[in-house]
Amino acid sequence: MRNRVADAVSFPMRLQAYMAKCGVGSRRSCESLIQEGRVMVNNKVVREMGVKVGENDIVQVDTETIELADRLYYIALNKPRGYVCTNYDPNEDRYARDLIDIRENRMLFNVGRLDKDSNGLIIFTNDGDFANKMMHPRYEVEKEYIVKLDRPVAIDDLTRALNGIYIDLPHPYRIKRYDLMPRTKEFVRVTLIEGKNREIRKIFSFLGYDVKSLTRIRVGCVELGEMRPGEWRNLTREEVNGLLSGSDGKDKKARGRR
């Protein structure tokens, strides 16, 4: 799915909004880049949030000039293990974004997290407004995973995870729903809403389990399906609209909540 970016742009606009529309990241992540002193406007470092830019201003992030993209991209990738989702890390050399073989892949960024040791579905875009909405708690976009543990999981432990576990934050880590996998007691299907950093791994580690593998199979209404590791596809218009409307593509009554 592709749309013209220029159709929705009017100047002047706030610097972080311009950066988001250029595909640097969500507005929140762009604000962090500004505060870290990594953004220049017309060769001057900017750290304030209130700065506005015009159509002829030159904006650079980490000394690289950014521009509005000609098109908007919404892409689903099956990330293999061993790849990172950050756009830049001096200690890493395998970036998930590089698996997407389009000319503008340097303008793409991931929506949400999927850590290096995990694999499965992750969404990339260059639409900062879309990413901002996707990550806003109000939209409650579900993420579904298949988790392999080192031993059969106890129902009592899953119930504790449903009710919420306080680990290292003032707010609890909590799963929304789980489904036991038939004939494979070491596997469990888990659904989250918030997706804190390494949330599933922290929950099961706290409960005394070792996570052997973690595969994300769904984000909202978008499913991993038959994509092989490293494969990607464009989202359909229906999928993009479904993500923004909060649709998860599932019959929640039929699935139930354990």
Image: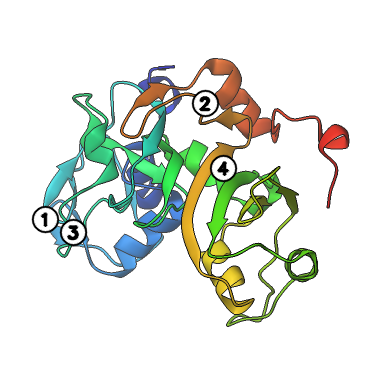
Q: Residue at x 41, y 28 (%)?
A: 75
- Seen in the picture, residue 38 relative to 70 is either above or below; the reply is below
Q: Residues within 10 Å of mark 4 (few under 14, many from 20)?
A: many
Quadrant placement of the N terminus: top left
Residue bearing mark 4:
134
Q: Residue at x 57, y 38 (%)?
A: 219
Distance between the Cα atoms at labels 4 and 1?
32 Å
Q: Is residue 250 left or right of residue 77?
A: right
Residue bearing mark 3:
92
Front one among 39 and 179:
179
Distance between the Cα atoms at labels 1 and 2?
46 Å
Q: Could you say where residue 239 lies in the image, as x and y percent from the top left? A: 58, 23
Q: Earlier in the sequence, mark 2 or mark 3?
A: 3
Distance between the Cα atoms at labels 4 and 3?
26 Å
Disc 2 marks which amino acid? Gly
Q: Which mark is residue 225?
A: 2
- From the viewer's perspective, is the residue at label 4 or at label 2 nearer? 2
Q: Could you say where residue 211 lies in the image, as x and y percent from the top left? A: 50, 63
Q: Residue at x 35, y 34 (%)?
A: 229
Q: Earlier in the sequence, mark 3 or mark 1?
A: 1
- From the viewer's perspective, is the residue at label 2 or at label 3 nearer? 2
Disc 3 marks which amino acid? Glu
- From the viewer's perspective, is the residue at label 4 or at label 3 nearer? 3
Name the secondary structure under disc 1. Answer: loop
